[in-house]
Amino acid sequence: MTTSTTPVTTTHAATDSPAADRGSAPGLLAGLGGVALAASSVLFVAGAATSPPQDDASAGAYIESLGEDPFLTGLSANLFHYSWVLAAFGAIAAIGLVRGRRGRALTVVGGLAAAFGSIQFTGLLYSDWVLPALDHQLSAGTAVSVFEEVTGAPSVAIWLLSAKVFGLLGFPLLYAGLARAGVIAWWLVPLSLLPMVAFGVVGGLLGVALAVACYAPSYVVGWRLVQRSRIAA
């Protein structure tokens, strides 16, 4: 008697395949990047709203304002710090929204510049914890002298300048690249230049409200990333 052997074929679920794993990871990262980008703007506005008021624009008034309310100073500094941390992640994630060649170069340059500038800003915020200590431990004149000597150092000046140039101009370039690629509308791009104007020129509650509105590009791009994550999932 002969016995025939029938080969058995095992079929694995699609969720166990490496291809499925590769597909889910980019979607998750895009979603997290979108949330980070939108949240960074909210935290920045909150940091500006809780920043201790100062009598004038002098270094002495700045140091005194930070030293008068250490709790408010620390709260504002933390909000600013983590807003830039999240902005760095969001800027990198936004580059992935461009699929074709149109707008890709500008998006990459803007995204990398924005991420670099954001990282630079996070380190600069360390001074918001140092300056209140100077105000408490030293005389007003000595505190100002120390502050001016530190900020006058060439490497610190370059650090601050690079943070401003890359951090504040990188995002408009990023959004211009995304607009060029058809990801967002062009009218959103100039809005990204206006939040600092709202804080510095208008000020007060009206300035905060205007800044929230001017951060519309980050909300829209953040939502696009969340949408992309749903498609990839």
Image: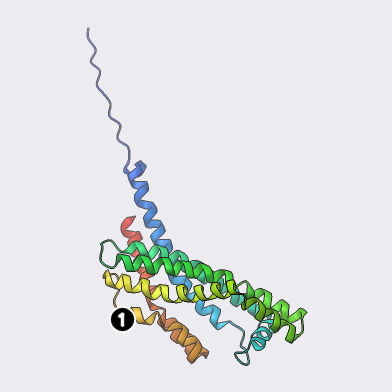
Tell me which residue sits at (66%, 74%) in the image: 129
Along the horizontal axis of the image, is 114 left or right of 74? left
Residue 209 pos. (x, y %): 46, 86
Along the horizontal axis of the image, is 116 left or right of 187? right
Residue 78, located in which quarter of the rendered image?
Answer: bottom right
Q: SS for tag 1?
A: loop
| Residue at the far top in the pictured view | 1
Tell me which residue sits at (28%, 61%) in the image: 99
Judge by depth and name the residue closer to the eye, 7 or 206. 206
Judge by depth and name the residue closer to the eye, 193 or 31. 193
Along the horizontal axis of the image, is 209 left or right of 1? right
* Residue 226 visible here: no
Residue marked by disc 1: 187
Tell me which residue sits at (62%, 84%) in the image: 52
* Residue 2 visible here: yes
Identify whether 139 is placed above or below 104.
Answer: below
Residue 57, located in which quarter of the rendered image?
Answer: bottom right
**Dividing the image into 4 quarters, which one contains the C terminus?**
bottom left
Residue 85 pos. (x, y %): 51, 67
**Dividing the image into 4 quarters, which one contains the N terminus?**
top left
Residue 160 pos. (x, y %): 54, 75
Residue 33 pos. (x, y %): 42, 63
